[in-house]
Image (cartoon, rainbow, N blue to C red):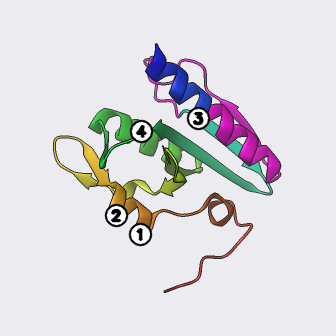
Amino acid sequence: MAHYNKGASAERELIKLLWNLGFVAARVAGSGKNALPMPDLIALGKGKSFIFECKAWRGNYLNISAEQMAELQKWGEVSGAQAFIGWKYPNKGWFFVKPEHFRKSKHYNISIATTMKVGIPLEVVVGEQRQLKV
């Protein structure tokens, strides 16, 4: 139950961040336990739509099942929303990664080192800031 609470708490935190940036956002009840594909969060506003699969995880790698990634991508295709995986890493904050940055093997994975390089700040995701090319 502690793992569920940590994830749910992270999702609620992200909802507040999105609202503070002028987006309406909601958690999807039963995501991950429904027969139909569903993301963890949906955010809408300013002519944009986003879907997020959220993970709160301390570790060198984040793994997402092939089924979960396929469901997120399917939802994005059908809805036209931009899909992101939001990884909340303790004491480092949120990182937002596009599905194509994950490596595919038996499941999809990405290292924290790669995430820190390719991760996009939330303000850039929603278009409030631009990311400088380095």
Q: CA distance from mark 3 to mark 2?
A: 21 Å
Q: Report whether residue 101 is seen.
A: no
- Please give the residue where the numbered disc 1 appears in the rendered image: 117
User: Amino acid under label 3?
Assistant: Ala
Is residue 33 inside the magenta stretch?
A: yes
User: Amino acid under label 2?
Assistant: Thr
Which labelled disc corresponds to residue 10? 3
User: Amino acid under label 1?
Assistant: Lys
The residue positioned 60% from the left and 19% from the top of the image is: 29
Q: Are marks 1 and 2 in contact (CB under 8 Å)?
A: yes
The residue positioned 36% from the left and 40% from the top of the image is: 70
Q: Quadrant of residue 64?
A: top left
For marks 4 and 1, the one nearer the N-term is 4
Is residue 127 inside the magenta stretch?
A: no
Q: Secondary structure at mark 2?
A: helix
Q: Residues within 10 Å of mark 2 (few under 14, many from 20)?
A: some
Q: CA distance from mark 1 to mark 2?
A: 5 Å
Which residue of the protein is positioned furthest toward the top in this rendering? 1
Q: CA distance from mark 4 to mark 2?
A: 15 Å
Q: Position of residue 133 (x, y in %)?
A: 52, 85
Which labelled disc corresponds to residue 57? 4
Q: Secondary structure at mark 1?
A: helix
For marks 1 and 3, the one nearer the N-term is 3
For marks 3 and 2, the one nearer the N-term is 3
Q: Residues within 10 Å of mark 3 (few under 14, many from 20)?
A: some
For marks 4 and 3, the one nearer the N-term is 3
Q: Position of residue 101 (x, y in %)?
A: 36, 60
Which labelled disc corresponds to residue 114? 2
Which residue of the protein is positioned furthest toward the left in this rendering? 106
Q: Which residues are magenta?
A: 11-39
